[in-house]
Amino acid sequence: MTAPPEIYLETGERLAEQRRLGSDVEDAGLIARSRHEPDAFTGIYDRYFPVIHRYVAGRLGPQAADDLAAEAFLVAFRKRDRFDPERGTVRPWLFGIATNLVAQHRRAEVRHFRALARTGAEPAAESHENRVLTAVTAARLQPQLAHALTLLSQQERDVVLLVASGELSHQEIATALAIPNGTVRSRLSRARKTLRAALAHEGIPASE
Amino acid sequence: VNDTDLQMFQPLFTEPEPAPQVVAAGRARLQHSYQRPGFRLPRVRLPVLASLGVAATATAVVVVAVGTAATNPQPRGGRGATLHLSASQVLLTAARTVASLPAAQPSPRQWLLIRSVEYQAGAKTATSLEWTTFNGVRSAYYQAGKLVMHSAPVPAAITGGSPMGAYDVLRKLPPYPRALLAALGRVSAGQVIADGTTQARVWQNIVQLLWNSPVAAPSKQQAEIFLALTKIPGLRVERVNDALGKPAIGLYLPAAGHSDLLLDPHTYQVVGRLSISNGRYTKAEREMARIKKFTLYPAGTITWSIARSTTPVSGPGQS
C-alpha cells in the first residue's frame, strides 16, 4: 500500500531536517576538534570545497575560483577559534568568508559578468524543438542576467547571489555578512527593483 | 520569505565539480598551512584574474620573441588575455550556435581541400595543401610542382583516422552527456594520456576525433558533444591566437597537458590546435637535449601550433 503523498513528504522533510541538523552538529564538532587537531578541518574542506568553488566560479570564473576557494578555507582555518555554533552553522560562515574574498576582486567580477553578457550577441537558434535547445534555454538568458547583475552594487550583488547560488536564508546571510537582518531585506528589495527594471527592458518578465 | 524569483540566476552557476587535482591542491595548501609552525598566511594578493592576464601577456611576449628569433618574421600562435568566462559558459554558447547550422554530410567521394599552417618553435612556419576524398580512399598533394595522387584500399581508408570514419564515430555517439562521455572513454584514439585519468582519456579522444573530422559532425550531434564537454571537471578556456595569428578560443584540460583545441570565436568550429610547454623536463630529457642540442622551452612557450581550414572542391589540385 502506498502512503499518502502528504505524509510521505512530511516524513521526508523531517528526515532531511534531521540529517541537516545532524551534519550541522557534526560540522561544529569538526571545527571544535580542529582547534587541537588541525587535520580535522580537512573534513570541513572535503564537505564544502565543491560548493564554495562553484559559488566563486560563478562570480569570478573557474580559474580564479581554484585559488580563491582554497584561500577561503585557509582564512576559515585561521578564524576557526572565532567560529561560534550558537550564531550560525558552518555553511553560511564559509559563504561569508568567500563573499568577503570575492569583494576584494569586484572589478574582476564585473569584467566576468560583462564578458558573459556579451556571449549572447547572436540571435537564438531557429525554433526547432530538440533536446539541445531545451538544455541551453537557461543558458540563453545568461547574457541578460549577467548584464543585470552588473547594475547592482557589490553589496546588493552579494545578497542576491548568496540567495541564488548559496540558497542561504535571510538570517544565514545576515550571519554570513555580519549585518542586521533588516539590512539584508533592504538590500534585496533595492536589488529586486533594479533587476526588474533591467530585465523588463530586455523583455524578460521577473516573477514576483 | 519567498526568494524563488532569484533562482533565475542559478544558470550562472553551472560550473561542474572542481577537478580532483584542484581539490587536492587546495587540501594540500590547507595542510601545509598548519604543518609549518609559525607559518602566517599572506594577505590576499592582487586580483587573480588581473594577475593571470599579466602573466598571459608576458607569455605572449616570450612566444613572439621565440618565434621571431627562430626564423619566423611574423608572430605566430601567441597567447592573449585570459577569457573571463568559464569553459562551460563558452561550450553552452558553442552548443547553441552549432545547433542552428545546417546539417550537410558530403558524399563519400567528395573532394576536400585541407589547408594547414603549422608552426613549430625553432622552425619555419609551413603551409601545406592536401586534397582528400571524404571517405579518405583517394588523396593528393603537390611535390616539386607535380600533383601526386594516392589511393588506399577502401576498408583500410575508412577508419576513425579518415574524415568520413571520424565523422561516423562522432555521428554515432549517444546523445546524452553521461552516455556520450562514457562512449568517448571507450574509444581508442591511440593517444598517450598525461596522467591516465578517465577524464583525460575522454578529452584526448574527443580532441582527436574532432581533429580527424575536418567537416566536423552533424550539427545537432556537435551541439550534444559541446554540452557533454561541460560535464568534464577542470576544463579550461583561454583566448589565444592560432598559427595564422587569428584570435581563437582555446580549450584544454590541465590533467591531459596544456594542449589546446582551438575554436573559431564566431562559428565555434574547430580551427586548430596548439601545445604549450609546462617547462618541466625529466633528468633524462635534459640530458638528451644536451647531447642532441634540442631546445628546452620555458613554461608558457608555444611549442607547436596548427591552423586548418577545409573547403569542398571539385577535384584534386582545385581550390
Image: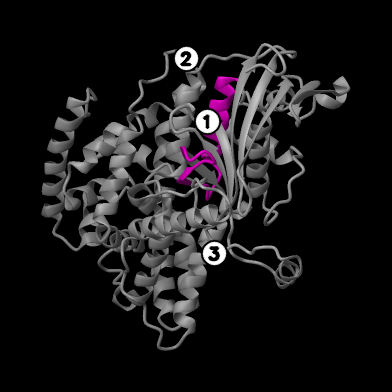
Residue B223 included in the magenta stretch of the image: yes
> Residue B52: where, in percent of width, then height?
39, 58
Pick the residue in front: B289 or A111: B289
Q: Which residue is mark 1?
A: A2
Q: Amino acid at mark 2?
A: Glu
Q: Amino acid at mark 1?
A: Thr
Q: Amino acid at mark 3?
A: Ala
CA gap, disc 3 and disc 1:
45 Å
Give the SS element for disc 1.
loop
- The residue stretch that appears in magenta: B218-247
Quarter containing the N terminus of chain A: top right
Q: Are marks 2 and 1 in contact (CB under 8 Å)?
A: no
- Work out whether A35 lies above or below B104: below
Pick the residue in front: B244 or A47: B244
Q: Which residue is mark 3?
A: B24
Q: Residues within 10 Å of mark 3 (few under 14, many from 20)?
A: few
Residue B30 included in the magenta stretch of the image: no
- Asked if both marks, 2 and 1, belong to the same chain, the answer given is yes
Q: Disc 2 sits on a residue from what chain?
A: A
Question: Residue at 11% across / 53% down in the picture?
Answer: A182
Closer to viewer: mark 3 or mark 1? 3
Q: Which residue is mark 2?
A: A129
* Badge 2 or badge 1: first in the primary sequence: 1
Left or right of residue B225, residue B141 in this image: right
